[in-house]
Image (cartoon, rainbow, N blue to C red):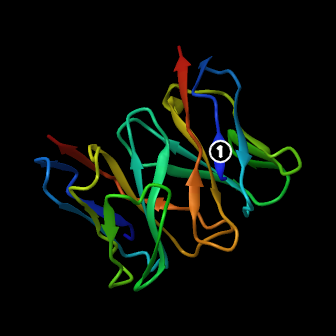
Amino acid sequence: DGGITQSPKYLFRKEGQNVTLSCEQNLNHDAMYWYRQDPGQGLRLIYYSQIVNDFQKGDIAEGYSVSREKKESFPLTVTSAQKNPTAFYLCASTRQGGNNSPLHFGNGTRLTVT
Amino acid sequence: GQSLEQPSEVTAVEGAIVQINCTYQTSGFYGLSWYQQHDGGAPTFLSYNGLDGLEETGRFSSFLSRSDSYGYLLLQELQMKDSASYFCAAPIKETYKYIFGTGTRLKVLA
């Protein structure tokens, strides 16, 4: 079955360490997205990519970095520059950006930094 | 700027009808989508309005009025399992950017 896999489900890190969250999809989707969700809040866009080797900053890109070397993979690195990294991170993909192509989400990674 | 605003919380009883509103300010978008998210889970797609008017999908309906920069999700015959957060979302024209509203937490009471 096709879908989006995020790993790990829970991640714990010490302050000052970079950490990379994995996102893999086998839906053959062109566009991929990373969102951050804080408790009781909406989804805020971190980065998105519409094609391999190309990506754009979202609304809260500071302290994060991404790569898109393969169509299936869109890893997110949370750097030590991110002031409040503890959050629920969601990866999503869609067949093509815009119009009525719905987003498909992974099950998320809950990151805790102490 | 681009933003979608929703009420933070709505409460209703089982079997009732509830409407969740979404007002938006965007520089241009294709339409309005709705997603459901249960606590701790991933959002799942519910519906999409590309044109003004009402779209019906079972117990859920969604409405869009571009002239009023407004849309809503209507849930009928509420069930306990409908207790979740609901988000409106918009794919932005000319880009692949996809932004979400502030979210509405729906509590269904027995």
Return the residue nearer the eye: A96 or B7.
B7
Quadrant containing the C terminus of chain A is: top left
Instruction: Give the residue type that dot 1 points to.
Output: Leu
Does B37 sit above or below residue B10?
A: below
Specify the quadrant that holds the N terminus of chain A: bottom left
Does any portion of residue A107 appear in the rendered image? yes
**One can see residue A32 in this view:** no
> Residue at position x 34%, y 84% from top?
A70
Mark 1 lies on a secondary structure that is strand
Up-down: is A111 above or below A66? above
| Left-right relation of B21 to A63 | right
Quarter of the image for residue A39 reads top left
Total marks shown come to 1
Label 1: chain letter: B
- Residue at point 28% right, 52% down? A82
Residue B79: quarter of image: top right
Q: Is A34 in front, or is A64?
A: A64
Residue at the (57%, 65%) spot, across then down: B97
Which of the two residues, B47 or A99, is positioned nearer the viewer here? A99
**Which residue lies most toward the right here?**
B67
Q: Position of residue B31 (x, y in %)?
A: 73, 58
- Please name the residue that numbered disc 1 is placed on: B4
Q: Position of residue B83 (x, y in %)?
A: 51, 29
Image location of residue A25, percent across then percent down: 36, 72
Of B42 and A1, nearer the camera is B42
